């Protein structure tokens, strides 16, 4: 039994450790309820707390401030609109070809978050309308998520998908074709309709293995009635699914023609509408932060400086705010001030942009 309300809150709202590249972890992510916020104490209310209570209260705030609710940025809204169009056009019989999606962006722009949130939303909707079991009694898995690693082979790609479903063949010694057949069977048995493949930038598309991997989704698309969302860093520059990549290779032409690009770009404050959108974003984040000396406009007043530190990257922004909250709590500042921001370490994407 916990000793106080904040220790209880920490117990009830632990940091999730699910491995979402497995079916069990993905299912937990899909059905994880949002954390319930608690009241931010004033200095007067914090003063009577004993050492343990204050430590638990700050631990609860750290969990909250490090896992802020997802904000519907312009980039997320635009990406969801594109994916909605593609998914709607793919509501067709299994023998008809489907269009896939490529989410391409530099680091720190939230591309993986966008793909995960969309797949989660899709997964929930299918379960809500059709239930958690298929007509044959199998567990329904509307969406799947896995990532590739460097030097992944064609065989390894099939194993990664089988590993998501928890199929024992993921670790067995089998031919690539046999593994592919089993992967297709898993997708069909679980009635999966959306598959996200992340970290595709780790594949060298100039290498033979990379070319095979780039070709393979076309084979999957022929055998699986699903939509694929491919996610990676600077895939355009890597010529992922580029029709000219392999000269006259018709496979690339066909694969490219079946894909819709969904580029994710940083916020741009060089225009009045862009600056207003940036301020609106900061204002939205302000409403979620748990700091006792927080005041409306705290972030908006520093909009230009925060942009300079993050270059409009949503990942860099959330990281900056998370660490700034920690510094504000640890130092007793209890607000994100210019002095607090000066103490915050930047992630690599933001630091590189700041130095350039």
Image (cartoon, rainbow, N blue to C red):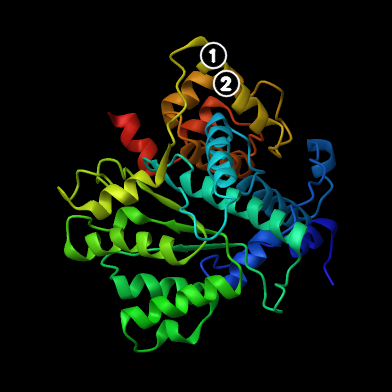
Q: Are the residues flagged by discs 1 and 2 in contact, CB closer than 8 Å?
A: yes
Question: Dot 2: few (<14), some (14–19), or many (≥20) neighbours within 10 Å?
Answer: some
Q: Position of residue 249 (x, y in %)?
A: 19, 53
Mark sitting on residue 277: 2
Write the residue at 80% across / 43% down: 46
> In the current view of this chain or complex, which residue is farthest to the top?
272
Residue sitting nearer the eye, 151 or 11: 151
Report whether residue 17 is seen.
no
Q: Quadrant of residue 156?
A: bottom left
Report whether residue 176 is seen.
yes
Q: Quadrant of residue 322?
A: top right
Residue sitting nearer the eye, 219 or 269: 219
Residue sitting nearer the eye, 165 or 54: 165
SS assignment at label 1: helix
SS assignment at label 2: helix
Q: In which quadrant will I find the N terminus?
A: bottom right
Q: Position of residue 311 (x, y in %)?
A: 41, 29
| Residue designated by label 1 | 273
Q: Could you give the CA–CA distance between mark 1 and mark 2, rounded to whole angstroms?
A: 6 Å
Q: In which quadrant will I find the C terminus?
A: top left
Q: Position of residue 74 (x, y in %)?
A: 56, 29
Residue 348 shown left or right of residue 50 in the figure: left
Residue 47 shown left or right of residue 166 in the figure: right
Write the residue at 51% across / 67% down: 21
Q: Quadrant of residue 81?
A: top right
Question: Dot 1: few (<14), some (14–19), or many (≥20) neighbours within 10 Å?
Answer: few
Write the residue at 33% across / 32% down: 353
């Amino acid at each position: 039994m916990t000793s106080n309300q904040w220790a209880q809150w920490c117990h009830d709202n632990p940091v999730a450790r699910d491995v979402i590249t497995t079916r069990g972890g993905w299912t937990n992510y899909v059905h994880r309820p949002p954390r319930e916020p608690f009241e931010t104490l004033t200095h007067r209310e914090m003063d009577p707390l004993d050492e343990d209570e204050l430590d638990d209260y700050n631990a609860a705030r750290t969990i909250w401030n490090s896992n802020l609710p997802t904000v519907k940025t312009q980039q997320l809204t635009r990406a969801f609109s594109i994916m909605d169009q593609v998914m709607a056009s793919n509501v067709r019989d299994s023998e008809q070809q489907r269009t896939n999606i490529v989410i391409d962006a530099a680091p720190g722009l939230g591309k993986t978050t966008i793909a995960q949130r969309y797949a989660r939303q899709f997964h929930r909707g299918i379960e809500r309308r059709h239930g958690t079991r298929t007509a044959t009694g199998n567990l329904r898995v509307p969406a799947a998520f896995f990532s590739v690693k460097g030097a992944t082979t064609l065989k390894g790609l099939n194993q990664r998908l089988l590993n998501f479903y928890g199929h024992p063949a993921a670790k067995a010694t089998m031919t690539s074709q046999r593994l592919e057949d089993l992967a297709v069977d898993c997708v069909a048995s679980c009635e999966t309709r959306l598959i996200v493949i992340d970290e595709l930038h780790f594949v060298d598309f100039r290498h033979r293995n990379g070319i095979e991997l780039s070709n393979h989704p076309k084979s999957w698309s022929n055998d699986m009635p699903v939509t694929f969302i491919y996610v990676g860093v600077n895939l355009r520059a890597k010529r992922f699914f580029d029709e000219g990549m392999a000269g006259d290779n018709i496979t690339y032409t066909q694969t490219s023609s079946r894909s819709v690009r969904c580029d994710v770009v940083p916020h741009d404050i060089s225009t009045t509408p862009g600056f207003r959108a940036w301020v609106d974003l900061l204002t939205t984040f302000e409403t979620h932060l748990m700091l006792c000396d927080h005041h409306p406009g705290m972030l908006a007043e520093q909009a230009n400086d925060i942009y300079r530190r993050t270059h409009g990257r949503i990942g860099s922004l959330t990281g900056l705010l998370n660490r700034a909250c920690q510094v504000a709590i640890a130092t007793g500042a209890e607000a994100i001030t210019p002095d607090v921001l000066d103490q915050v370490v930047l992630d690599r994407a933001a630091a590189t942009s700041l130095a350039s």
